[in-house]
Amino acid sequence: MCGITGIYAFNEFGKQLLSKIDLAVNAITQRGPDSKGTYCFENVALGHTRLAVIDTSDAASQPFTDISGRYTIIFNGEFYNYKEHKLNLEKKGYKFLSTSDTEVLLYLFIDEGVGFIDKVNGCFAFAIFDNIKNELFIFRDRFGIKPLTYFANENIIAFGSEMKSLLAMGLPKQIDFYSLSLYFQLNYIPAPFSIFENFKKLLPAHYLHITKSDFNEIKYYKIPDFEQNANITYNDSQEKLAELLEQATVSRLVSDVPLGAFLSGGIDSSVIVSLASKHVNKLNTFSIGYKNEPFFDETNYANLVAKKFNTNHTVFSLSNDDLFENLHNILDYIDEPFADSSAIPVYILSQLTRKHVTVALSGDGADEIFAGYYKHFAHWMAENSSLKNISVKLLSPFLNIFPESRNSSFSNKIRQIKRYNKGLSASSSDRYWNWCSLMNENDANRLIAKQIDFNILKTKRNSLIYKKDGSINSVLYNDVNLVLQGDMLHKVDLMSMANALEVRVPFLDYNIVNFAFSLNSDFKINSEMKKRILQDTFREILPTELYKRPKHGFEVPMLKWFRYELKTLISENLSNKEFIQKQGIFNYPEIQNIINKLHSNSPADSQANIWALLVFQHWWKKYFS
């Protein structure tokens, strides 16, 4: 993995910004500490920072220009099936100067044009410039594993792996308050939206085609129609899934640097470790746990898996001090408000893992394509279980006497039931959005001092819900396009690349995603089991204890922190009325309502709301004060 950035100027005024390319590259050097380089041609500047993984020699350095001098590429990611295409290109007479996947990617484009992207299996964001036609192509992978943000106006298009490269160019920063509302609802800002006006995230499965006169964003892939393999038997489906997943895992073991795997002790990471350990002797595996928080610690399950597959296992046992010690570094690295608190342990896990390996496999993506979250079961129940729904509605008046919180099993269950009950009376699309959100739309809008046009916000929100029929496959499709790319994958890329660690996700091989959506939804979830086919396929291989454990997110004990250790942080950033009013972004009384709820006996999701506010304030002070 690496970092890429660049500028395409439409006119003489735009060309004045080309000299900023070195500043843009320097802003993302943590993504690629091994080397950096730039390329300039009349109205175009490209920059690259390299994390050397495949062909670590100078021959694979970037920007990489073909032997004719016409085409230049900057590439962030991995092209897993590059070897088979290299053989085909060699048969056609192409000569290669390196053993890198980057060079193969460039010559495949030269040979076939933009249609070549259908043959690329990988995670990527890359740009290819043709200096004869003076046109630039920028591609992003199918599911948004690798990020790409761009700025566009009448003078330039500027782009980068992270927004900090664009900000280093001195581009104008104007907060988009509609995106800010989405941020407080979701705790992240999904593509194509951005915290700034004129900044956009390139949508997954799209590419930009830029010429001297215009630019267009073009879609090149979509998940096939649902349930095309509805007649395949459950047993045959299990065999096919095992075959595809092993192929995907093996293809992601290609590396010229040390490689390992994250191991949480959940089904997803354990499946990946079970497959990878068949092909790597004493696979390096890594877990983190919490010394003082047994409710959040799951390392005993990871240890069982490591023992079962004879991995070289390392457990990083963290104290609250370890988490606090890294808090400022994490907040400082974020260049757009992002408030998924599980980014904290992901950052520390990446930091510690990087001391041992350069590449790590991950189980990300399985929940979104095979229905692994509690909310998926809730959606299934809402559509299929009328008797239970009636029971929940009858019980709802009595539930209000119980506190709701994320900090214990009982209070978290109460929180979930109350959210479920509210969702039953909503439409399928509203229910989906509400169950993705940590703050409702009205509360988010009241929190923001600037007047927001509700109709515009509603249009933006609805554009993020791609399927509205409430079926499980539709819910999963929405998750892939909203939650997966906006939250889960962004978190892993941002926190891992902050530590120059490459993370690979076998579950998001597009062959597996296509297969998953071709199956009957009953294969994924029913009244008894979430992620059914994945669990059953590997049931005889994995330790039985994994099937008896409750699902637990990669969470941190935020509520306790805010009430004690981080109380001062809240006081300085949220309770200072004079500062809030001078800032002019928030309504002070609404912030106080959230703080009061945090300290009540029923805090619900207020800890997530407080964290979103603190993240924003740190970000705002860095870029505006």
Image: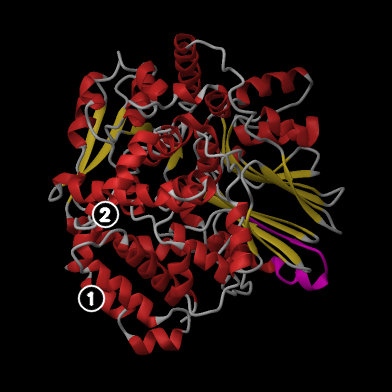
Residue 568 got which mark?
1
Q: Nearer the viewer, residue 438 or 559?
A: 438
Q: State left or right for residue 232 relative to residue 329.
A: right
Q: Position of residue 158 (x, y in %)?
A: 68, 61
Decide: is 526 above or below 78. Answer: above
Q: Quadrant of residue 119?
A: top right
The magenta stretch is 5-18
Callout 1: helix, strand or loop? Answer: helix
Q: Nearer the viewer, residue 317 or 363?
A: 363
Q: Is residue 262 magenta?
A: no
Decide: is 107 above or below 173. Answer: above
Q: State left or right for residue 528 relative to residue 301.
A: right
Residue 488 got which mark?
none
Mark 2 Cα within 10 Å, few/some/many (few <14, many 20+)?
few
Mark nearer the N terminus (2 vs 1) = 2
Residue 397 got which mark?
2
Total tally of numbered discs in the picture: 2
Q: Nearer the viewer, residue 73 or 437?
A: 437
Q: Nearer the viewer, residue 343 or 82?
A: 343
Q: Position of residue 226 (x, y in %)?
A: 60, 27
The residue under label 2 is which amino acid type?
Pro
Query: In the image, what residue occupies the spot 61% across and 72% down?
Result: 453
Query: In the image, what residue occupies the spot 21% across and 56% down?
Result: 322
Callout 2: helix, strand or loop? Answer: helix
Mark nearer the viewer, 2 or 1: 2
Q: State left or right for residue 101 relative to residue 586.
A: right
Q: Position of residue 13 (x, y in %)?
A: 79, 73
Label pair 2/1, CB-CB below 8 angstroms: no
Mark 1 Cα within 10 Å, few/some/many (few <14, many 20+)?
few
Q: Is residue 17 magenta?
A: yes
